[in-house]
Image (cartoon, helix red, strand yellow):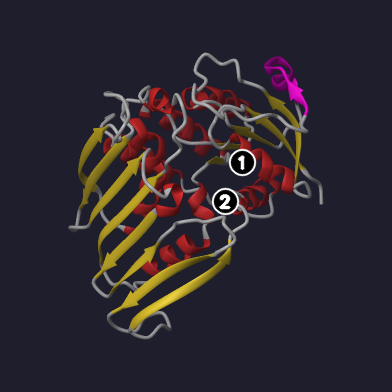
Amino acid sequence: MRRLKVLFWGLTHEHACGKLCTLGNMAEIFEVVGVVDDRESATRPNFADHPASPGEFPVLTAEEALALEDIDVVFIETTNADLMKTAAVFVDKGVPLHCDKPCGEDMKTYRLLVEKCRSKNLPFQIGYMYRGNPALKFARNAVRSGWLGEVSFVEADMNHDYQLEGYSQYISSFKGGILYNLGCHLVDMVLSFVKGKLVSAVPLIGDAPGDPPGSRTRGTALLAFEGGAQALVRTSSHMPGGIDGRRLRIDGTNGTLEICPIERFDGESLKLELTLKNPAGGYASGRHILDFGVLCDRFRDQLEDLALIVRGDKANDQDYDHDLLVHETTLKACGVI
């Protein structure tokens, strides 16, 4: 099986280090032929322990990278402010993309890129890493299959406790703050579980305890949808327990589903709690604890799927409309539009 040639553009995104590590562990599928080092970017985040290092992979200048003619897929892992303008170069070149999130504070720019990709049937995978999470896959199937009945409320939070010098200044550079930077993951989840159009979004952007005024390191949004479903999404940069407290809860007329933590890499199994009023999906009424085993990588599932599409072993099943809706809802949820 021919390996897919990868150009990895950028080392300054928070996920760059993890993505490079995953690609290195998928050497039977991907060959990283070059990394563009953007650590001198004017928009580089200024917090400690950042950015990544190219490690074992060859480093290319931007000019050398753009001269490559046989790239199968490009990974865009620049600073958030540079993601869309870098992606635009490769959309115009017709190269399949994996691009990290969020997709810029200007909805028109992202929409234009998505429509260009749609017209070319070009994969434009966004780094919503939870799409490959096995517990969340189960949750999406449970909702689609009606096991929970009619979903009435979703609560999701994505917090951390980095305590990194300079992080609050970095987050304050976004109008929507941390709710823009992290909340897109939560919105992607929520839109998989609720029906109807968004009818209102009430954002509350503030500062996490201990951060300077104007940091925007705490954000909450209440979303209301046609049909009556509501969702509460929460983000904070100072939460005891950090990522171990990230949580999803779905309430329906026939039951509830809860995942906490949403992911874990401490050697313990990822678990989900399902409680049913009436039997559904082969599960009896009552409380069930489902075990999805130990997670080893948060990115691999999504990248394996991309490889199948790029290689032509699977049709391009990207839901461009859903991706547009996720970003538009994110911008509304954090008060950007």
Identified at 42% across, 24% down, the residue is 170
Q: Where residue 202 appears, x then y in whole percent?
A: 19, 40
Q: CA distance from mark 1 to mark 2?
A: 9 Å
Please give the name of the residue rendered at 23% of the width and 72% of the height, measured from the top-left corner.
253
Q: Nearer the viewer, residue 67 or 281?
A: 281
Taking 128 as reference, is 248 left or right?
left
- Horizontal side of 63 relative to 13 (left or right) equals right
Q: Amino acid at mark 1?
A: Gly
- Locate residue 57 relative to residue 165 in the image: left or right: right
The answer to the question of whether label 1 and label 2 lie on touching residues, with beta carbons closer than 8 A, is yes
Determine whether, in the image, residue 75 is placed left or right of residue 219: right
Which of the two residues, 266 or 107, is positioned nearer the viewer here? 266
The front one of 150 and 160 is 160
Q: Which residue is mark 2?
A: 298
Q: Nearer the viewer, residue 267 or 216?
A: 267
Mark 1: secondary structure? helix
Q: Residue furthest right?
A: 1
- In primary-sequence order, the first of circles 1 and 2 is 1
Q: Which residues are magenta?
A: 58-68
Magenta-span inclusion, residue 262: no
Check the picture and name the quadrant holding the C terminus.
Answer: top left
Label 1 crowd bin: few (<14), some (14–19), many (20+), radius 10 Å: some
Q: Secondary structure at mark 2?
A: loop
Residue 178 x, y percent position in the rendering? 36, 34
Type of amino acid under label 2 = Arg
Q: Residue at x 49, y 45 (%)?
A: 128
Rendering coords of residue 21 (x, y %):
68, 42
139 vs 231: above or below: below
Which numbered tag is attached to residue 18? 1
Residue 231 image point, x, y percent? 26, 52
Looking at the image, residue 279 lies above or below residue 248: below
